[in-house]
Image (tube, grey):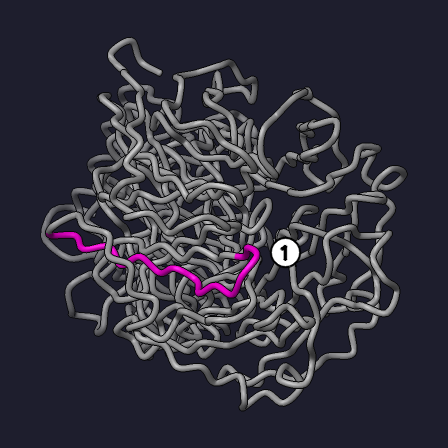
């Protein structure tokens, strides 16, 4: 925190008007589209209970309990787990309710699917899924994730609470979504028949791009289901494969505590003894024990940036203080939470309930009431909220990963990393609108990696707002060669500038001055991509990229599939280099978010909309004409030749506009190349040649 930061919390539980005892899970999502998170609380006690649903009014700040009126009460013998999830990909959050007991406690009851009409009113459509209707098990926790990578969310639930010691006749539940919120029991025998208990977390713990499942186990080892990218799961022994010998009896929480781009793991067992173990991820799913806590209170701990300094802090569900991150993943005791005595604390979830730019949280306690805490942060630190929708229309885009960087530095100095998911720790769901503290940064770059492999990027995003990203960017792939740098003997371009360290880390184009982490050895130079609807139309987007010796253009993170922040549609692409004429696609391209459009400028002169830019560098290989020494890159002018002459007289070396052969110096070879192109008619205007 900065010296001016003051962090404190106010217990505003009275605003919930007391849900009564028996609270187990807390879940946040904006269900009615008014841009404030609502709260769902599951309950189970010694008599039948309804769930509680608190609607958040952004005008009055009032939280009103409206579960019955909105069709979300789910009155039965009691529930533990639930989650908000967009089950029908219509852009709003539905509810999966994991029922534990039937009314009268004569046995378990089936789970429920509640579909949102878009205004925050729900209809129970469980009867449309006979496999769910006919399955009665004591559900403890629930998760909704895209198991088969078909763009919709499937459902997994944990049965029982002991884990290995639970009855062998009980099993977990796994259902595949047909795309409309109707579910069919899946094969998935391993997930269904491996006994686990208490909380489950849907997370990509090994960073391979698919969603794995990690479940607690009170009477056995940690249960880790690893996804093979095709929805086939294997049971991973955590002691030998992940180097995790400790158990999690109740909750597993994931978060990037050291901002290195992978997810670290917190294991909590309520006990006895009550213990928490924090493990750091090495980036590929192997973990190193960092520290432990004894006598923790509650079934889980939760990560959130409480002070907006860009790192994740920690709160255990029943403790009376929070732990602040020093920026490197080490935690020290922070402010005290003034709260009544807890009896049986269970879960904790985070959201900015008052939209004031800092993170608040709710806690559940089985033997008392759910509690709500408002963050009173006083600080100069900035923040950003990110609201995702998948290209299939799914609110929250569960399974996505979001990374932020300082403005124009995507891929360089990471400021934050988050994963969207339905379930965390023990029966908890943070707001699907991701919250990032930014510290003193006033603008950032954002990269979103969706679970279907598509990407969205935003550059120079202003702080202190909610950024909405609706689906992936369109993808573009291209290839082009530059005269001067081209070597006809190897059919590649020379890389003298990169070898001499003369290609700057910052792009030279003012319209998009982004930074690269480093300049690869096979890079030639920076290049600028411009996108318009027509060749004469206004530029809709400018994006700097790096050109490699084989003619391929890649973004600054090394990806050849370049995401462009544009909707799907028809576009004309222009490529610019600092001392070559520009190339424009000879026809409009249809750009998609899931399939890249390719345009190879090197195949022939007919690929260029600007014929003066086309130069045959070798038989059948075309490239951009060099000589644009004064940055007027429609044609070559007499002033280009004058600029080269002046640079030669001045004895200039380095990264210069007049260096037409990109060898790091301006000499007679540059003059000769520029003059030759002018004599061939690639110029306009007067003056001597």
In the image: residue 504, left or right of residue 152: left
Q: What span is in magenta?
A: 44-59
Q: Is residue 466 above or below residue 299?
A: below
Quadrant location, the N terminus: top left
Identity of the residue drawn at 57% across and 31% down = 260
Residue 468 in the image, given as x and y percentages of width and height: 29, 57
Q: Is residue 75 above or below residue 331?
A: below
Q: Is residue 53 magenta?
A: yes
Q: Which residue is mark 1?
A: 209
Quarter-wise, where is residue 379 in the image?
top left
In the image: residue 666, left or right of residue 184: left
Neighbour tally class for label 1: few under 14, some 14-19, many 20 plus, Cα within 10 Å: many
- Foreground: 455 or 341? 341
Identity of the residue drawn at 63% across and 89% down = 130
Identify the element where label 1 is drawn. loop
Residue 15 in the image, given as x and y percentages of width and height: 25, 44
Identity of the residue drawn at 19% across and 49% down = 632
Q: Is residue 323 above or below residue 579?
A: above
Q: Magenta residues: mostly which secondary structure? A: loop
Using the rendered image of the protein, determine whether residue 154 is visible from the camera's viewpoint: no
Identity of the residue drawn at 69% across and 21% down = 292
Residue 149 in the image, given as x and y percentages of width and height: 61, 71
- Foreground: 247 or 163? 163
In the image: residue 675, left or right of residue 132: left
């Amino acid at each position: 925190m900065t010296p001016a930061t003051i962090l404190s919390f106010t217990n505003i539980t009275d605003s919930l008007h007391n849900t009564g005892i028996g609270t187990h899970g807390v879940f946040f999502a904006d269900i009615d589209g008014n841009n404030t998170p609502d709260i769902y609380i599951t309950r189970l006690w010694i008599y039948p209970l309804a769930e509680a649903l608190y609607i958040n009014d952004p005008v009055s700040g009032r939280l009103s309990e409206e579960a019955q009126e909105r069709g979300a009460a789910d009155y039965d013998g009691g529930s533990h787990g639930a989650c908000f999830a967009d089950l029908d990909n219509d852009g709003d959050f539905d509810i999966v309710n994991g029922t534990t007991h039937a009314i009268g406690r004569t046995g378990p009851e089936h789970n429920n699917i509640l579909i949102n009409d878009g205004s925050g009113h729900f209809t129970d459509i469980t009867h449309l899924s006979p496999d769910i209707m006919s399955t009665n098990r004591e559900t403890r926790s629930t998760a909704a994730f895209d198991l088969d990578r078909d763009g919709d969310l499937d459902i997994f639930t944990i049965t029982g609470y002991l884990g290995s010691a639970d009855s062998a006749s009980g099993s977990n539940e796994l259902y595949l979504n047909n795309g409309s919120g109707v579910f069919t029991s899946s094969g998935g025998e391993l997930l269904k028949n491996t006994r686990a208990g208490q909380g489950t977390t849907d997370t990509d713990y090994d960073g391979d791009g698919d969603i794995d499942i990690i479940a607690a186990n009170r009477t056995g080892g940690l249960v880790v289901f690893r996804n093979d990218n095709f929805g086939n799961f294997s049971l991973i022994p955590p002691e030998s494969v992940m180097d995790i010998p400790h158990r999690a009896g109740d909750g597993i929480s994931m978060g990037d505590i050291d901002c290195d781009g992978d997810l670290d793991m917190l294991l909590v067992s309520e006990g006895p003894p009550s213990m928490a173990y924090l493990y750091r991820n090495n980036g590929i799913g192997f973990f190193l024990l960092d520290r432990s806590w004894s006598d923790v209170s509650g079934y889980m701990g939760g990560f959130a940036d409480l002070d907006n300094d860009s790192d994740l802090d920690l709160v255990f569900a029943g403790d009376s203080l929070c732990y602040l991150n020093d920026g490197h993943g080490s935690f020290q005791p922070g402010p005290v939470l003034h709260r009544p005595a807890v009896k049986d604390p269970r879960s904790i979830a985070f959201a900015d309930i008052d939209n004031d730019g800092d993170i608040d949280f709710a806690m559940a306690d089985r033997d008392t009431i759910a509690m709500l805490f408002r963050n009173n942060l006083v600080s100069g630190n900035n923040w950003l909220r990110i609201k995702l929708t998948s290209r299939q229309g799914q609110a929250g885009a569960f399974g996505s990963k979001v990374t932020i960087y300082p403005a124009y530095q995507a891929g360089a100095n990471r400021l934050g990393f988050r994963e969207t998911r339905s379930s965390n720790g023990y029966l908890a769901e943070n707001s699907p609108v991701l919250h990032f503290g930014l510290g003193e940064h006033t603008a950032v770059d954002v990269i979103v990696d969706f679970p279907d492999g598509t990407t969205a990027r935003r550059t120079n995003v202003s702080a202190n707002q909610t950024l909405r990203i609706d689906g992936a960017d369109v993808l573009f792939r291209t290839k082009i060669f530059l005269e001067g740098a081209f070597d006809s003997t190897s059919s590649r371009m020379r890389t003298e500038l990169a070898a001499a360290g003369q290609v700057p880390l910052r792009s030279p184009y003012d319209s998009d001055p982004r930074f690269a982490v480093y300049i690869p050895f096979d890079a030639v130079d920076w290049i600028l991509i411009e996108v318009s609807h027509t060749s004469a139309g206004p530029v809709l987007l400018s994006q700097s990229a790096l050109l490699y010796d084989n003619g391929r253009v890649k973004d600054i993170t090394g990806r050849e599939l370049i995401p462009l922040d544009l909707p799907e549609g028809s576009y004309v692409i222009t490529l610019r280099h600092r001392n070559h004429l520009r190339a424009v696609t000879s026809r409009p391209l249809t750009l998609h978010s899931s399939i890249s459009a390719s345009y190879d400028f090197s195949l022939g002169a007919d690929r260029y909309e600007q014929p003066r830019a086309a130069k045959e560098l070798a038989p059948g290989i075309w490239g951009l004409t060099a000589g644009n020494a004064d940055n007027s890159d429609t044609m070559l002018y007499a002033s280009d030749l004058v600029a080269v002459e002046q640079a030669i007289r001045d004895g200039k070396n380095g990264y210069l506009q007049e260096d037409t052969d990109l060898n790091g110096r301006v000499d007679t070879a540059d003059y000769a190349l520029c003059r030759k192109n002018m004599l061939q008619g690639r110029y306009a205007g007067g003056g001597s040649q």
